[in-house]
Amino acid sequence: MVSSKVLFLSYYLSIHITLGQVIWRHGINFHDYTDDK
């Protein structure tokens, strides 16, 4: 039970970290694109 919770938390955090990086990169790219126009 405890091990499954740890695996779930690590999986949950890894997904959110990956999504955060993707959103952050898209946000930077979007700002750079608008600044160029």
Image (spheres, rainbow, N blue to C red):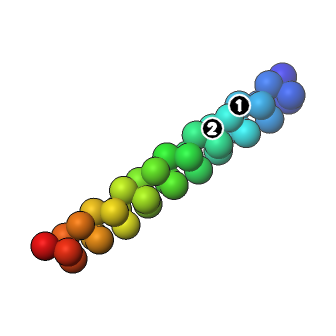
Looking at the rendered image, the quarter that the C terminus falls into is bottom left
Q: Position of residue 20 (x, y in %)?
A: 50, 53
Dot 1 corresponds to which residue? 8
Q: Residue furthest left?
A: 37
Position in image of residue 17 (x %, y %) = 59, 50
Mark 2 Cα-neighbour bin, 10 Å: few <14, some 14–19, many ≥20: few
- Residue at figure coordinates x 80%, y 35% from the top left: 6
Say what amino acid the circle numbered 1 marks: Phe
Dot 1, crowdedness within 10 Å: few (<14), some or many (≥20)?
few
Q: Nearer the viewer, residue 18 or 34?
A: 34
Work out whether 22 lies above or below 2.
below
Alpha-carbon span between mark 2 and mark 1: 6 Å
| Mark 2 and mark 1 residues within 8 Å of each other at the beta carbon | yes
Q: Which residue corresponds to the image point at 20% horizontal and 75% vertical from the top-left?
A: 36
Image location (x, y in percent) of residue 32: 29, 71
**Which quadrant does the N terminus fall into?**
top right
**10 lies left or right of 23:** right
Q: Quadrant of residue 15?
A: top right
| Label 2 secondary element | helix
| Residue 24 in the image: above or below residue 10 | below
Give the amino acid type for the residue marked by disc 2 in the picture: Tyr
Give residue 29's quadrant in the image. Answer: bottom left
Name the residue: 27% across, 63% down: 30
Determine which residue is flagged by label 2: 12
Residue farthest to the bottom? 35
Q: Is residue 29 left or right of residue 36?
A: right
Count the marks: how many?
Answer: 2
Q: Secondary structure at mark 1?
A: helix
| Residue sitting nearer the eye, 25 or 9 | 25
Residue 27 image offset from top left, x and y in percent: 34, 62
